[in-house]
Amino acid sequence: MNKNINQMISQFLDDELDHTELDSLLHEIKNKPELKNTFNRYQVMSQALKAEQNITINADFLEKIKQQINQEPHYLLPKKVSKNRSVNFWQKTSLAVAATVACVAVIVSQQVGTQDNNQTQQMAAVDIKLLEQPAQNVEYINKPSQHERLKAYLQAHNDELYTHGSLYVHPLASTVSYGRD
Amino acid sequence: MFYRVLLIFCLSNTVAFAKAADVSAQKLLENMSQAMKQLDYQGTVAFFKNGRLDTMKYFHSVNNGQEQERLLSLNSPMREVIREAGSVRCVFKKTNEVVVNNNPVSDSFIVDLPEDFATLHNVYSFVALESESVAMLPAYVISIEPKDQYRYKRKIWINKENFLPLKSEVYDLSGTTVEQVVFTDIHVSSPISTASSIDHKVKNHNTKEQVEPPSIEQARIVLQQLPLHYSVVFYTRMDERSMGQSTGHILLSDGFSAVSVYIEDKGDDTKEGLRVLGSVKSLTKIIDNFQITVLGEVPVSAVRFIAQGIRLK
């Protein structure tokens, strides 16, 4: 039942419901407030996917941050003699912690920025390449991913390769799927 | 040549009859189906699908009873596509490669039509609408309206002079146009040169060399329920080079709408669920170690209904 409701919500977001089904769905949502959360979640997912933005973080993300921190130079500066000797130990410690946190935040934000940009560009390049060449000429060493298989299915199913010169597939965008609850 | 003149004469006579009120929309569709198969004609066609527009030169010819359709792109990627003797070859001019599909899903680049319109009356209504003009040519407008939720509505504009299709549109359940094919110019001609550049290196598409397709009995699944008037068109195995493993492909059609069912071993990343890929709906389900994907330009209810009836043998 839950699966059906989820599917109906997905269909609703794709304008696939007829009036009867729509009435039924709205009635369900009205009676079960928790379904509203599901509806909102699906809507956000749909919008995010249709926005064609895809940000993924590598599994070794944390490891790379660690390496970056390790590669930071160590500055051995002469110790300044503080004029204000009244600053106590705890103030010094809190300042040091704050500086460290700020440093890490800057490094992390730089890392995320450069990595994501590179990755997005790389993904786009791969997709264009795949679309420009006939998919059947690609020899896969490993089994293709589900997305690649879907593209092959689509190519076998319709004439878009001929009429448009490539296959219309938004990479992961405009794809709405539901999980099994 | 004599038969073509005779055909045009017969079609012209039919025009006179078409003016009479009792000519049914079905008869007009049947005339169109005949004209599409038997006349030599050419023109410029715009294909609009999923928000993309492409324009191509189109040629249709009949030689010794054998039809040939040819498309020439006007924009990059430059390509020539030929449908002949049940297969489609696509030449990409830049790479000089040819893609061959021995099991094309469609029978025509312009519009897919059933063999027998009369059998479809319990799933479609054929309604003649008010005449319109397409490319400055007067046209009959036929609305093909589904009677259930398993297919999309479409409209076809038929040239009043020679019954050739001038335009076709497919609409989703909300009435949005998901596909449009329209001639910007069209004329019936004398036999067209069928010379083409198809002598390049050939790479097969989704099937092996011309071999007899396997029987549906060899499929690993059984389709226990299909929407009314959907039937199996063919079963084939797709090229393992593109899929990484043997994949079965069953094509179903009601004459206008087509649905494909793909069967292969379950992948590590396989996820069940419904996906919307432009105007195409797909539903993947896992049964034991197999993943089955039902896919087509049909409403979600159609792919879901078909998927629900799939069982392993």
Image (cartoon, rainbow, N blue to C red):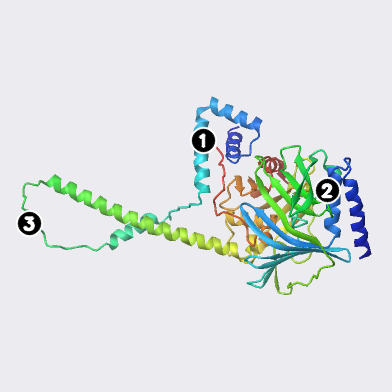
Which residue is labeled 1 in the image?
A38
Mark whose residue sits in front, 1 or 2: 2
Q: CA distance from mark 1 to mark 2?
A: 46 Å
- In the image, B313 versus B283, the foreground residue is B283
Q: Looking at the picture, how far across and down is residue A94, in whole percent?
A: 18, 46
Disc 3 crowd rating (10 Å Cα; few below 14, some 14-19, many 20+) is few
At label 3, the amino acid type is: Val
Q: Position of residue A10 (x, y in %)?
A: 58, 39
Q: Cα distance, mark 1 to mark 3? A: 61 Å
- Kind of element beneath mark 2: helix
Report whether B106 appears left or right of B2. left
Specify the subunit that label 3 lies on.
Answer: A
Same-chain status of marks 1 and 2: no
**Does mark 2 fall on the same chain as mark 3?**
no
The structure residue drawn at horizontal position 53% and vertical position 48%, both measured from the top left corner, is A50
Residue A81 circle label? 3
Q: What secondary structure is marked by label 1?
A: helix
Badge 1 amino acid: Thr
Q: Position of residue B288 (x, y in %)?
A: 64, 46
Q: Is disc 3 placed on a helix, strand or loop?
A: loop
Q: Are marks 1 and 2 in contact (CB under 8 Å)?
A: no
Q: Amino acid at mark 2?
A: Leu
